[in-house]
């Protein structure tokens, strides 16, 4: 009788599961940071500012901005993967759903708990969906595309995030201590979670 082979951690179905679990967790992280009202990531300040100034939900702007950013991949000769397209289509949906489900906290300690949980969730989610190896998010691909043109990763990320943060702030997005916490913590958290989430087997 032949043995039944179970999917390994590196098999495509498991990688796909990691991808969508990571995107869902990333949406939760975004929602918690925004609902804390202490300031979010530069991109989310931008999405929030667009929502305040031009209508539509934050999640819808995550989708629309992601699609527009992916168009910038064309001159940068970046190739999207399943993960890239899934990021564009579903991250905003997950974020809107999480914001709808999560109650807005009033006490300051609860708001800080939301913020810190959101940042940790975002770091873990980054490890999950990048570790799936199915393509970077559109915003990450923009950074690596600029790197191919000669900018260092640090310079490309700084230019992009400073630009969207300034635009988001001007549009009315919330910039605060949470934005600083995110900027300081997301790199180390992503570095910590990436090896743990990388497919093996």
Image (spheres, rainbow, N blue to C red):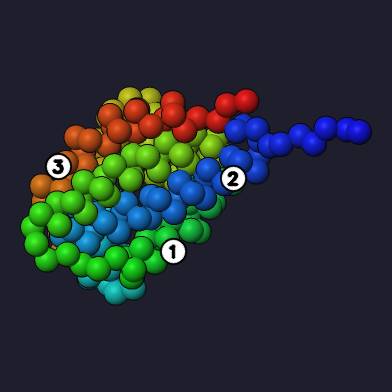
Quarter in which the C terminus is drawn: top right
Comparing 47 with 35, the one in front is 35
Q: Residue at x 53, y 43 (%)?
A: 18
Q: What element carries label 3?
A: helix
Q: What element carries label 2?
A: helix
Quarter in which the N terminus is drawn: top right
Rendering coords of residue 158 (x, y %)? 24, 35
Q: How far apart are marks 1 and 2 (CA)?
A: 18 Å
Q: From this view, report whether residue 65 is shown above or below residue 140.
A: below
User: Label 3, on which residue?
Assistant: 180
Q: Tag on residue 93?
A: 1
Q: How far apart are marks 2 and 3 (CA)?
A: 32 Å
Task: Determine the image quadrant of residue 48.
Answer: bottom left
Q: What element carries label 1?
A: helix
- Badges 1 and 2: C-beta atoms under 8 Å apart? no
Rendering coords of residue 65 (x, y %)? 39, 57
Q: From this view, report whether residue 102 is shown above or below residue 72.
A: below
Rendering coords of residue 129 (x, y %)? 48, 41
Q: Distance between the residues labelled 1 and 3?
A: 26 Å
């Amino acid at each position: 009788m032949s043995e039944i082979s179970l999917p390994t951690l590196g098999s495509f179905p498991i990688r796909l599961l990691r991808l969508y679990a990571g995107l869902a967790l990333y949406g939760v992280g975004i929602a918690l940071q925004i609902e804390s009202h202490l300031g979010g990531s530069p991109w989310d300040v931008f999405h929030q500012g667009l929502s305040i100034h031009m209508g539509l939900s934050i999640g819808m702007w995550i989708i629309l901005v992601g699609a527009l950013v992916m168009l910038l991949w064309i001159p940068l000769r970046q190739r999207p993967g399943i993960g890239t397209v899934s990021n564009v289509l579903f991250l905003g949906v997950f974020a809107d759903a999480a914001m709808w489900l999560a109650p807005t906290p009033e006490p300051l300690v609860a708001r800080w708990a939301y913020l810190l949980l959101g940042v940790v969730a975002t770091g873990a989610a980054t490890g999950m969906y990048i570790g799936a190896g199915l393509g970077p998010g559109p915003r990450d691909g923009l950074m690596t595309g600029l790197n191919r043109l000669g900018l260092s990763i640090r310079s490309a990320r700084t230019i992009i995030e400073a630009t969207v943060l300034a635009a988001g702030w001007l549009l009315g997005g919330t910039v605060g201590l949470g934005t600083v916490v995110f900027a300081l913590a997301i790199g180390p958290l992503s570095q910590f979670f990436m090896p743990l989430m990388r497919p093996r087997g």
